[in-house]
Structure formats: C-alpha cells, structure tokens
Image (cartoon, rainbow, N blue to C red):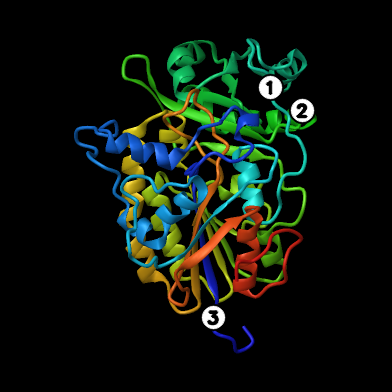
Amino acid sequence: MDGLPRARALLIVLDSVGIGGAEDADAYGDAGADTLGHIAEACAAGRGDREGLRQGRLSLPNLTALGLGLACEASTGRAPPGLELGNKAPRGAHGYGVETSRGKDTPSGHWEITGVPVDFDWGYFPDTHPAFPPALVEALIREGAIPGILGDRHASGTAIIAELGEESIATAKPICYTSIDSVFQIAAHEEAFGLERLYELCRTARRLCDAYRIGRVIARPFVGDPQSGFRRTAARKDFATPPPRATLLERLEQLGRAVISVGKIGDIFAHRSTGREVKAAGNMAMLTAALEAFRGLPEGGLVFANLVDFDTEFGHQRNVPGYAAALEAFDRRVPEIEALLQPGDMCVITADHGNDPTFRGTDHTREHTPILCFGPEIAGRSIGRRETLADIAASLARHLRIPDGETGASWW
C-alpha cells in the first residue's frame, strides 16, 4: 500500500441491536422502543432469567469497556443497568448512528452502513388476509408450477410454519407470508418440497415482486414433522434488490481490494461486490468464520459480517432471556477480537435497526444504532451522534485510504 502502514477493517453488524427509539420512531409505530435498554431493564428486574441459560443483570463487561453504555446514554439519556462504566475511561471510540433511510428493514440499514441510504419508498403488503395481490399469487402459481399457496398474510415465521407445516407437506403448497417489512417470504419443507425447488420458486417470486418494489424475497426452508415439531434450517436464502448506487463494497472491489462477506451479507447486497462469501450456522459460528477470514485478510481489505440470530431467533420471537444470553455470548468473545487486531487494523461493531423483544408485535423497531470503533491505534473517545449510518462507510473509507463516497462524514 505505497509504503504506508497496513490498514485493514472488520465490520460486524449485530443484527437488530438498537439502542433507543429514533426521533421519527412514532411515524413507524415504534415510539418508546429501546432494544438494548429494555433487555437490560428486564434482566435487572428478573425477567431475563431462564434456568440453564442465564440469570441476573445483563453482563456485557467487554462491550461496556469499549463504550457501549456511553453510546446508549448519548442516545437515550441513560445508561442501561449493568452497562455503567463509572469513572473508567472507555477503550473505544463510541457513539450512535441515526438511520436516514426510508424504512427499518435489513437492506436499508446495511446499504446505509455502506454509504447508500435508501431515498425511495419500498413497497409493502397490507396487513390483511389475503395480503398479496391476486395477480401476483396467480403468476407465482402458474410460473412456479405449484398447486397453490398457504398463508397469504402477515405472520411470525415460526408460528405460521407450526400452524401450516403439516398441510404444506400434504398438499405441496408452500407457505407464503409477509410482515411490516418490504418482504415476501416462502417456507417449504426441505425434503418434501425440495430445497433447490424452493430456491427456484423464490427466484421466480423475486422477478414477479420487482413490479411491487419489494426489497427481499426470502426462502425459509424447514424440516421436521407434526409429531416432533417443525424447525427452520440454516439454508435460508435471501433474494434482494441490488443497491441503487455504488456501495463501499463496490468501491473497494474497483480498487482491487479484498472483500470477504460473512453470513447473509451476500444476499442483502444481491451478491454485488460482496467478494468471497462465507456461510455458517449461528452467531458464534459466523463470528468464528469472520475472525478466521480476518486472519488471512490482505492489506487494504474488509471483512463484513452479519450476526443474524439476535434478530431472527430472539428479537422476532420476543425472547428476552435468549436475546440477553446471545449478547453475553458475543461479549465474551470481544477479547478474542481485540487480540486479533494488529497495528493498522480497525474493528467497527454496529447494528442495522432495532427489534425490541419487550415491544408489541414481532417486527423491527425504528431505533438509533450503536457504533463502537476500536483497534491498537484507536484512542477511546466519543464520536457523538452520527447523522447517518453512512458515516460508518466514510470512516472505513478514510481508514482504508480510498476516495470518499457520495454520503457520510468520517469521524477521523
């Protein structure tokens, strides 16, 4: 890199770990939501206890030392119980981000993190039964060569699979459902329906949904039977609309820099400039994969990881003890991340939106997101309120010594 000290970056998105309602939360029906704060309060009140899983106050000592509690305090005016730093100096640069994209969905948050806020309106399906336009359903049945669909409404994925899984197997009709997000989800049994057949059906649905401006079509394979119960598998696959403009990933690719995407990053960006894609099942396996990828990352490269379990397994399921335990499991591995970082390396931990497990409904919540930035040569300090998540892309670009993008301001 022209004789300069090496610079590499690790970007970890804790999917849905919001830290307090955004100023426009009321417009999304989310006034009062605070994912991390409410989890901590529930744990302090004993509502986060579960035998064999976890007990007591939320314990995130390593993230707190990096400035997580201070970021929460800057966002909401209070540090969540158990995340107070006291008189100690934080080890990381810390602050919070304000999403400017129109929406609180996964693509909007991730695209904005990479410098491309969503400045258009997504299409959504109404909370009615049926939810989908008849023309869309008819075309999917005809072009997908299926006998019909089940569901056709807003629903929790696990709940609707439990309700309709047996009928889906018996009739060969996939389960189609949506949510408050811009999404068309298709669930089918991996063995009875077939995984590749499900993927092909989702490709058809992706093409058909373009006319409705739907952000994602998601394949939701499941296994099991009525006696033992049904469970979703790690073979989920997202079919997303590509970002409308060049992201940080694309600019890195154009300069010949290495990009490694871990988890569902490739799907979120429609596999555009996502480099080598690595899949794994579960937060800890994905984090292990990200750290292994970072060990061999060349100078000037980026590892971009999404840890989706916070959102899918605990936020949407409104599972406070499970969410708390997942946060504590990640926190225990923060020293491992810090030990891996060499001079010139930087790690950013952030989120894409909220999903408050104490809130009404089962959907994402419009919230501020934490930003923690650390490395051997990065001093602990406040980076304050960032007026767009695109500031993350701008700061990564500055660190990796590539030209600035169109949006965002670096905190360096």
Q: Is residue 387 above or below residue 3?
A: above
Q: Viewer-nearest of labels 2 and 1?
A: 1
Q: Which residue occupies the foreground of this view, 230 or 108?
A: 108
According to the picture, the residue beneath numbered tag 1 turns out to be: 125
Q: Is residue 272 left or right of residue 359?
A: right
Q: Could you say whether the residue bearing mark 1 is in a helix, strand or loop?
A: loop
Q: Is residue 142 left or right of residue 221?
A: right
The structure residue drawn at horizontal position 44% and vertical position 66%, both measured from the top left corner, is 92
Q: Estimate the x, y position of residue 182 in percent, counting from the top left.
A: 66, 31
According to the picture, the residue beneath numbered tag 2 turns out to be: 212
Q: Which residue occupies the foreground of this view, 338 or 146?
A: 338
Q: Estimate the x, y position of residue 177 in percent, counting from the top left.
A: 59, 21
What separation in Å lies between label 2 and label 1 (alpha carbons)? 9 Å
According to the picture, the residue beneath numbered tag 3 turns out to be: 6
Q: Earlier in the sequence, mark 2 or mark 1?
A: 1
* Amino acid type shown at disc 2: Tyr
The structure residue drawn at horizontal position 70% and vertical position 39%, both measured from the top left corner, is 102
Q: Estimate the x, y position of residue 258 in percent, counting from the top left.
A: 60, 68
